[in-house]
Image (cartoon, rainbow, N blue to C red):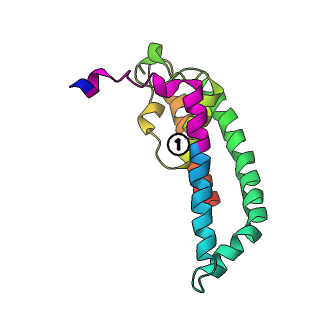
Amino acid sequence: SNLHNDTDDGKSRNKNAVIIYMCVFCAQICILWGRVCLIFATNRAVGPFISMIPGMVKDIINWAFVLGIFYVGYCFGTHFIIAGDIDARCGFEDEPNMENFSLVAEYNFILLMGQSEWSILEPNDCINGKRSLLLKFYMYGFSILGTVLLL
């Protein structure tokens, strides 16, 4: 169809001006929903709960600080145990190279949310059974700690 021929496979959506526009538009959407929240603040049933939110900000910051301390520690520990051994040469063609700390941090965040792919922790050409078991227990501990901290 003619519409299909006019597309550029998302290249125009990756231009800097479009990305800036997307960021501003997303901020406007958040502000809009904040306004809806303020409208509900006058409601007798919902209003007191919305009024409590500013008082909870300090508690949320303290919780995020404690979570951050454990999270960074577990990220460094995971990075030390894996040491770049999850990549294509070790039998992981579809997995990202875990040599970068940012990818290890992303994997730990996914683990914290309970969406981790556990097959990545199995023994392979580069990680033997003992190291795999160590990594699994380490991740189980982080999973339990994350669950407790998220309560």
Would you say residue 43 sits in the magenta stretch?
no
Q: Give the extent of the magenta segment.
A: 3-24
Q: Position of residue 29 (x, y in %)?
A: 56, 52
* 119 left or right, relative to 85: left
Q: Is residue 128 visible?
A: no
Q: Position of residue 62 (x, y in %)?
A: 77, 58
> Which residue in the protein does label 1 denote?
110
Q: Secondary structure at mark 1?
A: helix
Q: Is residue 29 above or below residue 12?
A: below
* 45 left or right, relative to 118: right
User: Which residue is rendered at x = 44% and y = 22% of the image?
Assistant: 124
Q: Quadrant of residue 45?
A: bottom right
Q: Is residue 44 visible?
A: yes
Q: Position of residue 79 (x, y in %)?
A: 64, 29
Q: How many marks?
A: 1
* 72 left or right, relative to 103: right
Q: Quadrant of the C terminus?
A: bottom right
* 54 left or right, relative to 98: right
Q: Nearest the camera: 81 or 55?
A: 55
User: Which residue is rendered at x = 37% and y = 23% of the image?
Assistant: 9
Would you say residue 4 sits in the magenta stretch?
yes
Q: Nearest the camera: 114 or 139?
A: 114
Going by the numbered disc 1, the residue's amino acid type is Ile
Which residue is situated farthest in the bottom direction here? Answer: 44
Prevailing SS of the magenta stretch = helix
Q: Is residue 21 above or below residue 93?
A: below
Which residue is situated farthest in the left direction here? Answer: 1
